[in-house]
Amino acid sequence: MKVEQFIKVLGADFYAGVPDSQLKALCDYLMDTYGVDKKRHIIGANEGNCTALAAGYHLATGKVPAVYMQNSGEGNIINPAASLLNDKVYAIPVIFIVGWRGEPGEHDEPQHIYQGEVTVRLLEDMDIRTFIVGKDTSLKELQSAMDDFQNVLTKGKSVAFVIRKGALTYERPVEYKNAYHMAREEIIRHIVRAAGEDPIVSTTGKASRELFEIREAGGQGHKYDFLTVGSMGHSSSIALGIAAQKPDTKVWCVDGDGAVLMHMGSLAVTGAFHPENLIHVVINNEAHETVGGMPTAAGATDLTAVAKACGYPHAVCVDTFEALDRELAAAKAGNTLSFIEVKCSIGARKDLGRPTTTARENKENFMNYLKEL
């Protein structure tokens, strides 16, 4: 189904969301049509943030907004859906559009398997009526579902369209780019070289995939790295938890701008404890690149200043490899909590693979290595 048809049937004129590869057609359409616009389309920090934005839109206009997300974001909407939107509270109607990663019967990455199994159940448990949209869903079927949903929305209840892989299409190509020149994979290669045998916690998405392949190409093994394949926004907290228990070991976190924004409160917690053995590197390409390249708010946010305000004693921003190497070496040699923001281009190798070990194997190898330290 063409995304233009889908949008027309929904009839919403405000969208907030966190981009998802399963919803790339929708994301590209919204960026191509509205860009990022406070009145029509906002890319939020996390899905709960988007739900609250939608609630504000409804309060101001009386209209029904739409919130889009990958199904992994359902966890972030549970609180506002249950304690803000629900008809036992404020009765604020929202149309959720949920990309169904890990759908039962469809091959997907390990972090999506269980989430895929419970996707529809979680929505229904929150009293959110659902309709599944697939490649074979007709426009008539979609319209009938929306007509039925209208009765639900008028009662102050929310509804959800769960989108299967390939269900929506958009024919106009949309290109995402920025003005930076340093490639993320090369940045990670420099971090690996500086870290030596120190443990590394890497964030969700292509960063972890690139780290795995760098280790593979160097014949180094994978025991040094914890690849946070899911749980977007939590890698720095994982690293803090490790650093607190291993005070004599340097611990590195390879993070991304979208992940930092998703749970930015973790910066304040890390700064408050300021572990001297933690090095937090944020690779900032100002984009949700792993799911398509749509922009994050990091392009308008001084992450280094935020880190300083949160209590990081040393926080810098670099945009050259010379400066990066200098800061990595200083952090390695020093004894202070360090935050290094690295400005990065958008893009990755087309032949970039995925980890060939399981998540459980990654955990066990990493834990065994930590025991040695």
Image (spheres, rainbow, N blue to C red):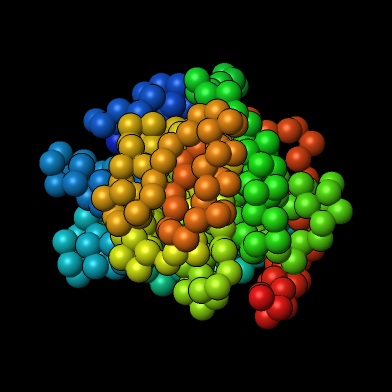
Closer to the camera in the image, 192 or 233: 192
Tell me if I can see residue 257 in this picture.
yes
Q: Looking at the picture, tell me which residue is in the foreground, 351 or 139.
A: 351
Name the residue located 58 percent from the left edge and 23 percent from the top edge: 181
Residue ranking furthest to the front: 333
Residue 313: x and y in percent read 34, 54
Q: Quadrant of the N terminus?
A: top right
Query: In the figure, residue 275 lies in which quadrant?
Result: bottom left
Q: Looking at the image, can residue 231 be seen?
A: no
Q: Residue at x 46, y 41 (%)?
A: 341
Q: Quadrant of the C terminus?
A: bottom right
Q: Residue at x 64, y 54 (%)?
A: 195
> To which quarter of the image does residue 350 belong?
top right
In the rendered view, tell whether residue 308 sits above or below residue 124: above
**Front residue of this view, candidates 240 and 360:** 240
Query: In the figure, is residue 108 to the left or right of 77?
Result: right
Q: Position of residue 18 (x, y in %)?
A: 43, 45
Residue 107 position, x and y percent, is: 74, 56
Q: Please say if 311 is above or below 184.
A: below
State the image coordinates of residue 54 (x, y, percent, origin top left). Answer: 26, 46
Q: Residue furthest left?
A: 60
**206 displayed left or right of 253:** right
Q: How many marks?
A: 0
Question: As displayed, is residue 277 above or below residue 371?
Answer: above
User: Which residue is located at x 31 percent, y 49 percent?
Assistant: 308
Taking the image as shown, residue 154 lies to the left or right of residue 360, namely left
* 276 or 294: nearer the viewer: 276
